[in-house]
Amino acid sequence: MIIEGCAGKTILLLQIGRAYQGVLETERKPDSVWTPVVHINVPPRCDSNLDWSLPFADFFGMDHTLNIEKRNYRSTDMTEPVVHHMQESRTSLILIDGVDRIHDSELGTAFDYFDSLQARLRVSIIYCGRGAADIVNEGLRQRSRSGRPRTSEQFRSSLPVMEIKPIPFREGAEEEWRSVLQAYDKNLVLYNHKPGSLLALDTLLHERTGGYMDTLDQLICQTAQQAIEDGTEVITEEGLNDMLVGRQDAEDEWT
């Protein structure tokens, strides 16, 4: 599967991993060896199998240096130990976050590596990142057979895509946005905060954030910190309007 879109992709990716493992744990008793879900972040440069093997080795806490006694900290390809460990721990799901950090020149190597893991381990993979669908599709196209019939359409994989979009707030679609604010309101700890007061600011908060979770989080957090510093201990419309969040706010202020 592929996850792409605006902020919140990593949170969703991890929640899927936790939910998947939770389902498995209801079917069997976990043990110290069992690791059904593996989560890695794409490193900055991945030119070879060695580079790709290290994030997996780090996940399992494996040492990947040679001649430690001689202080020669050169890393070694950990693919075989990693594959063996995942076979022994019965890994069945791999979460790969930050595929947008895979450079164009590395796509072939990356997806050859992922395909090899899938073939040897019979695992499912979820790719996550900005523009992930195009990146994954291009990576799969590059590693497809050179004799593949060419068409006028861009090659698209059959992987399902889950796109994270801003939360809407319009007539008839208010509940989702208000449920998010309700969660913030419930967990907001300020001396003068009255339960439900954030819900009264629902329109303003959506106008300021556009429904993006990362901007909402930043706006509420900064306003709450300011309320603590100035002693008001409450989030108000005036306090929210004093905060700058995101590029658009900065451009408006400059204008």
Image: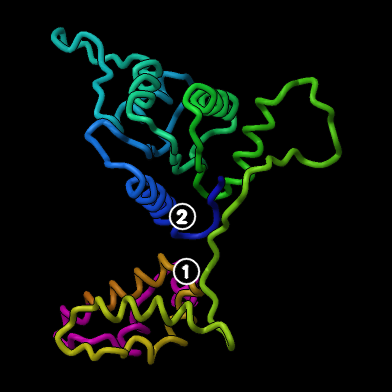
The answer to whether residue 72 is above or below residue 234 is above
Q: Which mark is residue 204?
A: none
- The x and y percentages for residue 91 are 39, 33
Callout 2: few (<14), some (14-19), or many (20+) C-alpha neighbours within 10 Å? Answer: many
Q: Earlier in the sequence, mark 1 or mark 2?
A: 2
Q: Which residue is mark 2?
A: 9
**In this view of the protein, which residue sits in the foreground, 156 or 92?**
92
- The x and y percentages for residue 187 are 25, 76
Q: Tell whether label 2 touches label 1 (CB within 8 Å).
A: no
Q: Which residue is mark 1?
A: 212
Q: CA distance from mark 1 to mark 2?
A: 12 Å
Helix, strand or loop at label 2? It is helix
Q: Amino acid at mark 1?
A: Tyr
Q: Residue at x 35, y 74 (%)?
A: 219
* Stretch of the chain drawn in magenta: 226-255
- The x and y percentages for residue 93 are 44, 38
**In this view of the protein, which residue sits in the foreground, 171 or 223?**
171
- The x and y percentages for residue 14 are 38, 50
Q: Residue at x 44, y 29 (%)?
A: 45
**Displayed quadrant of residue 145:** top right
